[in-house]
Every structure is written in C-alpha cells, then in structure tokens.
Amino acid sequence: MKKKTKSEFKTTERDEYSLKIYNKSMHYRLKCNILRFEYKAHVGSSLKSIGIHYLSDLLNPDIRAKLGERLISLWDEVVLNDWTIRTDELSSKDQVKLKDWKNANFWIDLHEETRKKNRNKFSKELAEYRKIVQDHSDNVHQVIKEALIEKWCKIVTATQTTQIGQKVQDHSNTLNDLAPIPEPIESEVKKRLCRVTRLDISNQKRGSVYLRESTIKTIYKNDSKLYKVLLDYFGPKWKKINSITDIFETIAKNIRDIYTNREAKARKQLQKYNEAIERYKNSLFPFDDELRFTS
C-alpha cells in the first residue's frame, strides 16, 4: 500500500470525535474516484447523546436515522473548496477574497484568531463564501450532501428489509401453518414470498406480492411474537388509529411503501447522478461511471 501524503486526505480532531475525508480509490490504485467521509467517535458520550449505548442499539431504525442526521450535520460544518466557482461572474473584490477562501490555512488561522473573541467575524466570512458558492457555482458541497443522504437512506432501508427477513425466518410457524389450505399437487406448488418481509404469501390471492391485511390479521390471531415484529417495523408511528383494522391497513401500506419508495429513490438518485456527470465531466475531480459514495 502506498504511503499517504497530506495531499491525499483531510482530517480534523475533536475531543469527542474525528472526521476524515479522502479518496478511497487511491489506496487500491483504482481509476475511479470513491469519496469516503468518516466519522469516528472517541468517547461514548458523542454516541450516547443520540441513544447509542450498545451495538445492538443500531438495530433500532430510529437510532440509525439519528446517526444519519449526525453524519449529515457534521458534513454541513465542512468547508469545501469548490472548484466549480465561475470567477468571471465575481466582482474584483470577491475575486481577491476567493484566493484566501481557497486556502485551507486561511480558515484555520481565522478560526484560531476569532475563537476567543470576535467569533462573529469567522461566521460572517464563512457565510459570505457560502453565498458565493450558492450563487456562482454548481455547489459541489450540496451535491455531495444529497448523495450522502441518499446513500444513508439506501443503507437504512436495505438493512431494515434484511432484518425483517431474518427475524421472520426465525419463527417456526409459516403462514401456511397458521391458515391451512388444501394441499395442491406438488408439481403445481410455487411458493410465493412477500417482497419485503420474505414471509410466505402462497395462500393469498394470485398476483399479490406483499402481505395483505387478511394475512396480517391471521398473524395477529395466531402468532403474537411475529405480529409484534411487524408492528414495531411497519406499524403506525404518529397517525391516530381508531381500530385494529386500521392498524392492519397501515402495516400493509408501509410494507408496500418500503419497496416502492426504494425504487423511486433509486430513479431519483440515477437522475441526479447523470446530471452530476454532465456538470463535472471536465472538472479536475470528474465523476465517472464507477463513482460511488461510501460510508
């Protein structure tokens, strides 16, 4: 492995955590660019503040969502040297200032200078730079932020679906056990599973691909443990529910939405990705067909 140089990555250290940004593909001498943004907690308090006390807490979807919010909030604090700024659109005064803004040492020195007094000076300078980025560039910082959000949503959604499948597979009862149907001829048997929960839905109407309310009702009556798993993951969170039937309908709807929303996010991500390629294909750090944002 090639020894790192300071030009290959940027880090910042805090008492409770550290951040690191670098091109992961350089470690493996890949032609593509893989941007890695790492958040490393040094003390437990930085994780306990969002409800993480044990590794098992990461199984909670709400906790994972908070962890994603923490990651995005830390990215918001990053000052990125945006190479897409259109300097010909800037005033002479802003062009001079831009030379300082593009120098990392300028921000480090300014932060040290204003840390104990006149702290508004740093905030004002940063706000001025970000306004220039917003009005006169492709805003690479925002593009990366959106990619981080989409990547995190994809990870959380995939993990949640996998965990549901694993949990329900641990139950010895299948839906056929709970609601027996006449034994078909073996050659005609084709087991059908819910696309999200991976539960057997062979006893449902032909063509159905998700758990239906009738099946959820059967689980409710016959397997309280399995029903609790479905309720915890797909049950109503904030919506006021008036009856148990409404709960069954909400669970079924949320199961369908898990799959359809994932497809919609994938289409949206692909569209933004293609737009990003067009914007940056001639830049110093171009996107290409192998670019991936990893966590």
Image: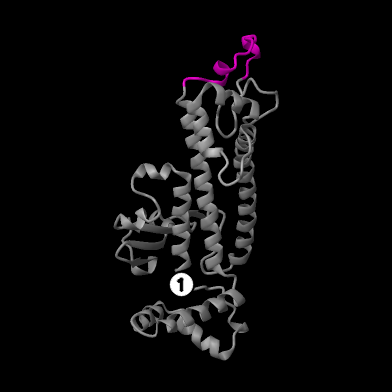
- Residue 196 at what x, y percent from top left? 57, 35
The residue at the point 55 percent across, 16 percent down is: 177
Q: Which residue ends up furthest to the front in the rendered image?
A: 242
With 139 as the anchor, is 4 left or right in this view? left
* Residue 34 spot, x, y in % from top left: 47, 57
Judge left or right: residue 116 versus residue 131: left
Image quadrant holding the N terminus, namely: bottom left
Q: Is residue 141 magenta?
A: no
Against 71, is 222 above or below? above
- In this view, 142 is above or below 108: above
Residue 283 quadrant: bottom right
- Asked if residue 174 is among those painted magenta in the image, a careful observer would answer yes
- Pointer 1 residue: 79
**Frontmost residue, 237 versus 70:** 237
Label 1, secondary structure: give it: loop
Q: Main secondary structure of the magenta part?
A: loop
Camera-side residue: 280 or 123?
Answer: 123
Mark 1 surroundings within 10 Å by alpha-carbon count, few (fewer than 14), some (14 through 19), many (20 or more): some
**Depth order, front residue of 246/254:** 246
Find residue 111 and report its horizontal and vertical position in percent: 37, 79
Viewer-nearest residue: 124 or 244: 244
Per the rendered image, the range of residues in magenta is 172-190
Task: Count every numbered label the image shows and give the total.
Answer: 1
Q: Which residue occupies 52% across, 73% down? A: 82
Q: Mark yes or no: residue 4 visible.
A: yes
Q: Amino acid at mark 1?
A: Val
Residue appearing at x 54%, y 64% in the figure: 286
Where, by quadrant of the figure, is residue 239 drawn? top right
Question: In the picture provided, is 185 more to the left or to the right than 65?
Answer: right
